[in-house]
Image (cartoon, grey):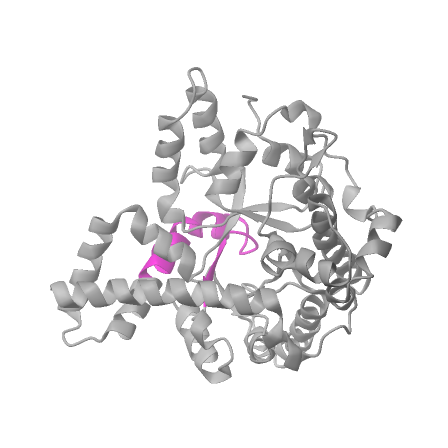
Amino acid sequence: MNESNLLEKLVQVSPGMEIWWDSSPVIFENWCRKLLAKAQEGEEETLKHQFARMYDGKNPERWLFRGVTTNPSLSLQAIKDDEPYWKEVVRSMIRENPGIDKESLFWLLYKEIVRRGSAMFLPLFEKSGYQEGYLSGQVDPRRCHERDVMLKQAYDLASINPNVMIKVPGTKEGYEVIEILTSKGIATNNTLTFVLPQLMDCAKSVQRGLEKAKANQVDLSRWRSVITHMEARYGDLGGLRDFAKEKGIELTEGEVRMAELAIFKKAYRLIKERKYPSKLLSCSLRVGPKVDGVLKLWHLEEKAGADIVVTCPPTFIDEVIHFPNQERIVFEKGRIDREIPKATLEKLLRVPYFERAYAEDGYSREEYKNLPPLVKTAQQFSKATDDMADFAGICIEEK
């Protein structure tokens, strides 16, 4: 095991890149214990050093993690990480709020997880002059087409801690919410975003909101905007290979990864060229593909040199830490600006599902709600939210 992991090496050649923790910070300590418990002999000290550089509660200027992304699914994982403890927390909430219903209790619980996680990153938020140390708290994914509900929840979440960034879905109504929040100086993270039209729609919405904020002399000292590209959710969950097969085209794993990267790279270039005030955030990353029998890390390698956020769930970080033959992975500064192979792009453009995803005007706002990866991801997030609400309901019944 190398002393420095691949994420640390990627940051070294990428000025402005931020690595974020894609889970609730409240599970970080337990995650470290689990990795140490399964470590091979001789790895423990190296792992401890890496964990301390990721996050240690002190010396925030040295942390690898510069922010956090969460959602109801990840908050549910935090509960399952120590269910007896969280049951006691919920029972205390019930005692303090007699007669509370299941949904109201769920929201209180969710906000408490957001509060505790964001508090862990307040030292970095303050040390960085409010530029880093944000934690994304997501509005209820079951209400992703209800503008006024999302706005009310957004204001509620934003009041928890000054470093809470509001995670808003890439729906027609979501972009209306993002523009309003931006106009009020509230930090946002656009999620459920998969295709170039969504990414650019968000960038333009943020710019309009920012212009309104400046015209009204709104305090923007604690404002930021990130736009999430859920990469493998576009290629895998969205069914790129299946859409290609409908046209008689067989795509390899590498070509699927290149399709995702093509969308990301084009959005990165356009946002830089047009000087939009948002920063791209890369998530839903995968290890692979294999090239000539050698395992690659294209989702990281192809972003070397990028001024972006890369958010990584614990499972992916584990894979990166234990990635085989790490010396074969070389991060080339400026790789983000290299186009994907012309022949690959031409092949991908023969698939209408990709062709539309790669064109800035490929989808209208009204059509976002029908995007396969958005529909499927929203269903997954909504199911996790229902499960979290059910947990609250069980606690009410057991009180």
> Up-down: is 393 above or below 113?
below
Is residue 215 visible in the rendered structure shown here?
A: no
Q: Residue furthest bottom?
A: 148
| Magenta stretch bounds | 112-138
Residue lying at the far top of the rendered structure = 42
Instruction: Tell which of 98 and 398 is nearer to you.
Output: 398
Q: Nearer the viewer, residue 149 or 166?
A: 149
Quarter of the image holding residue 41?
A: top left
Q: Is residue 40 left or right of residue 392?
A: right
In the depicted structure, whether residue 147 falls above or below residue 265: below
Q: Is residue 136 magenta?
A: yes
Question: Looking at the rendering, in which quadrant would you find the N terminus?
Answer: top right
> Could you tell whether 391 is left or right of 275 in the image?
left
Say which quadrant the C terminus sits in. bottom left
- Is residue 98 visible in the rendered image? The answer is yes
Q: Position of residue 161 (x, y in %)?
A: 40, 62
Asked if residue 88 is positioned above or below residue 399 in the image, the reply reads above
Residue 282 lies in the magenta stretch:
no
* Left or right of 264 on screen, residue 106: left
Q: Nearer the viewer, residue 173 or 207?
A: 173
Q: Residue furthest left?
A: 399
281 and 122: which is toward the camera: 281
**Label total for image:** 0
Residue under the point 43% across and 52% down? 122
Residue lying at 50% horizontally and 75% vertically, measured from the top left: 144
Residue 383: image location, x then y, percent: 40, 65
> Which image quadrant is residue 57 in?
top left
Residue 206 quadrant: bottom right
Q: Measuring from the top left, give residue 269's x and y in whole percent.
A: 79, 57
Q: Position of residue 175 (x, y in %)?
A: 60, 76
